Amino acid sequence: MRVKIDEDACTGCGVCESLCPDVFKIEEDEKAHIINPDDCNGCDCQEVIDSCPTQAILIEEE
Ligand code: SF4
């Protein structure tokens, strides 16, 4: 399982970073980026996905 950001949908609101700062970071382009994909163990992923106001966080099954 891998998390991805739909950069077209992301507004850079920062909700994901505040919930899971080890994995999500707002970069200089004011979009969320996955900084440590290997740190995502899925623990809070559904909460973060549900909290994103624009449904910009996607899960890819591997
Ligand atoms: S919660 Fe969604 S819209 Fe907000 S910064 Fe994260 S990915 Fe972007």
Image (cartoon, grey):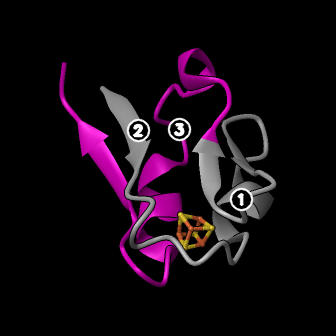
Q: Can you name the residue that lies furthest to the left here?
A: 61
Give the farthest residue toward the front.
Answer: 29
What x and y, as percent, mark residue 25? 74, 48
Residue at point 53% right, 38% down? 43
Within the image, what quadrant is residue 9 found in?
bottom left
Q: Which residue is mark 3?
A: 43
CB contact under 8 Å: marks 2 and 1: no
Q: Which residue is mark 1?
A: 29
Mark 1 secondary-structure assignment: loop
Are discs 3 and 2 less than 8 Å apart at CB? no
In magenta segment, residue 49: yes
| Residue 27 locus on image (x, y percent) | 77, 51
Q: Nearer the viewer, mark 1 or mark 3?
A: 1
Q: Quadrant of ligand 1?
A: bottom right
- Identify the magenta region: 34-62
Helix, strand or loop at disc 3? Answer: loop
Instruction: Indicate yes or no: mark 1 CB to ligand 1 under 8 Å.
Output: no
Instruction: Decide: few, some or many residues near mark 2? Use Cα within 10 Å; few <14, some 14-19, many ≥20.
Output: some
Q: Is residue 47 above or below residue 33?
A: below
**Residue under circle 2?**
3
Q: Residues within 10 Å of mark 1 (few under 14, many from 20)?
A: few
Nearer to the camera, 18 or 33: 33
What's the residue type where badge 2 is placed?
Val
Q: Give residue 38's position: percent from left, percent from top.
A: 56, 15
Q: Amino acid at mark 1?
A: Asp
Marking on residue 42: none
Q: CA distance from mark 1 to mark 3?
A: 27 Å
